[in-house]
Image (cartoon, rainbow, N blue to C red):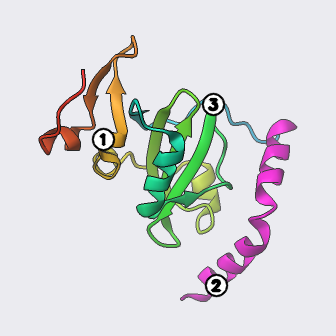
Amino acid sequence: MPPSTRIKKTFWSFITPLFPYVRDFLTKIGIVRHHGRQSYHLGWLAPGRTMKDFVEYLKTKGFGNHFIAWTDDGQVLSLRRQQDFEWQYHLRIFEDREVRGHYEETPEDHPVDHFEERGMEARRDEFLELLGDWVVEKDKSGKIISQSAPAAFRGRPRNG
């Protein structure tokens, strides 16, 4: 492991427990602004599925709490799966059951790039393959129009 990575890991081991408080304070006093929801819509949690069960499923796929991330409007959960120290898959779940996710550099390894949202990628197909029938798409009226595309391609019945 390069010395710079070792230094970053040591720094974040100390700052991580405090970071949410610092982030929230800086946002509250207006030094940092963060409003709305980030892009990268994936769908909504499927009917009959609970957030608790969804989180348990995501844990089996390597996701864990990501409490140092920004909190988007209406967000109830933020989870990530680190590919390594440099890259992660970040998933957010909202009170209206919307699910959003993106691939990005970790804040621990690239704090400035991460803050400025440089290098974010949708990776929608990867997310939908991973999420399977846990996430569905809806039309504007709220009617389910399809399961994730990979689930539909595997021959599972489509809702609608």
The front one of 39 and 125 is: 125
Q: Residue at x 43, y 37 (%)?
A: 49
Dot 3 alpha-carbon crowd within 10 angstroms: few under 14, some 14 to 19, many 20 or more? some
Disc 2: which residue: 6
Q: Is residue 134 above or below residue 5?
A: above
* Residue 80 visible here: yes
Q: What range of the chain is rendered magenta?
A: 1-29
The front one of 54 and 87 is: 54
Q: Residue at x 53, y 72 (%)?
A: 85
**Position of residue 95 measured from the top left corner of the image (x, y, whole percent):** 59, 30
Disc 1: which residue: 133
* Residue 89 visible here: no
* Quadrant containing the N terminus in the rendered view: bottom right
> What amino acid is found at the position of numbered circle 3 in the picture?
Gly
The residues tagged by marks 2 and 3 sit, at their Cα atoms, a distance apart of 35 Å
**Position of residue 147 measured from the top left corner of the image (x, y, whole percent):** 27, 33
Q: Earlier in the sequence, mark 1 or mark 2?
A: 2
Toward the front, the furthest residue is 48
> What amino acid is found at the position of numbered circle 2 in the picture?
Arg
